[in-house]
Amino acid sequence: MGRTVKLVLLDTLGVPLGALPPFDVSVPWWPEVEEVVAGARSRYGIEVQVLRLLTASGATAATGGGTVTYLAQLAGSPPIAVEPADPDLSPQPCRAPYAEPGGPAASIRWAIAALDALGSPNAVATQRKTWNLSAIWRLDVAGAPVAWLKQVPEFFAHEPAVLGLVAGVAPGLVPPLLAAGSQGRMLLAHVPGEDGFGAGAGVRAEIAAEWHPVQEHFADRVDDLLAVGLPDARLAVEPFARVAAGHRADVDGLGELIDELPRRLERIAACRLPDTIVHGDLHPGNARIRAGAPAVIMDWGDASVGHPADDILRLTEGLPGTEAEALTAAWALRWRAARPDSDPQLAAELMRPVFHLRRAVIYADFVAKIEPAEHPYHAADVREGLTAAVAAVR
């Protein structure tokens, strides 16, 4: 299953030109645009940078596919013929700089200059991904990848600082940060290997073991985490109740879960696990895996100060029950050794519905901080998180 792509074009000054005829790409996921850029080049002989999503129909972001229309900016001469198009170019206060005309070009210039200063001249940028949470380009020198330009919206601006903090405790656990700039730009060294999507219990156990010392270290340094801008996601009833308020009538059992939540959070606190740094999306797809080398954990935009069980629950998602239980038990043993008066196993069990409530809060915050045209990326996520929270209780 792929997707059908429509590109509405702007010229180099940001003036609308029209739309290219639709064409198909094999990768279904909406944020992935490398094949889109290559398709415009091979079919029409033009170079573009994809700016942002305009519309999507016939599918969801979770499934991918359907017909997806993007706004793209030409890097050179326009094609001979385009179809009429009248895109909405009105300003949006939540629009990321990389989604504006000229934004990608400015970011690429910054990254190439940074690599020049580091002794890697003549880099060539290839756009890989763009959506409401990030834009990513691969930078090659002499045909080989040397770095990645990542740009994030303002609400993820803490990511470079997090990389620095974690690297100070566990060098090699995060991609080396080569440079950080304005408007959410960062330049990361290329990490060999493959993304760990679909990895089994062995890889996940390795990630959990590598991550624990960092969480243990920062359990006594929460103020340091907050000082660099990490969001404060320590457990409290209010954020969960606020997001759930509009869904109590249509998610069966949600009202009872929220009403019971103060007591549940009290029981979690009684397990005496400390608040610490939380990656926030610690699944194996967010790790680079290479035989004979430790895993490197990527994508730190969701990092926050919170409960450490959040990460082990994310890391064990999708595993068979016995394998998930074994990883959770090993995680609990590490925390018992670090905090002998704690009950990590009970904390993880009590946290299961809270974990899903946290996902709902995160997605609700995304929707509040992105422009309306990008809401399809997260349209179903809030309700799904609330529904999963209820199911976790049952």
Image: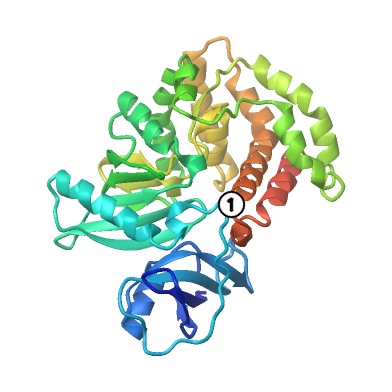
- Residue most toward the right? 249
Q: Relative to 192, is 220 above or below?
A: above
Residue at 68%, 46% in the rendered image: 385
Q: Nearer the viewer, residue 319 or 259?
A: 259
Q: Relative to 309, is 125 above or below?
A: below
Find disc 1 in the rendering and name its residue: 370
Task: Residue 323: give x, y in percent of width and height.
Answer: 53, 40
Residue at 32%, 71% in the rendered image: 75
Task: Residue 277: give x, y in percent of width and height.
Answer: 48, 27
Task: Residue 394: give x, y in percent of width and height.
Answer: 78, 40
Which color scheme did the rendering employ for the protein?
A: rainbow
Q: For label 1, count other residues whose C-alpha is less than 10 Å away and answer few (under 14), some (14-19) or many (20+).
A: some
Q: Relative to 282, is 3 above or below?
A: below
Residue type at the position of mark 1 = Ile
Q: Is residue 282 visible?
A: no
Residue at 43%, 46% in the rendered image: 286
Compared across the picture, whether 216 is left or right of 343 comes to: left
Compared across the picture, whether 255 is left or right of 323 comes to: right
Dividing the picture into quadrants, the one containing residue 215 is: top left
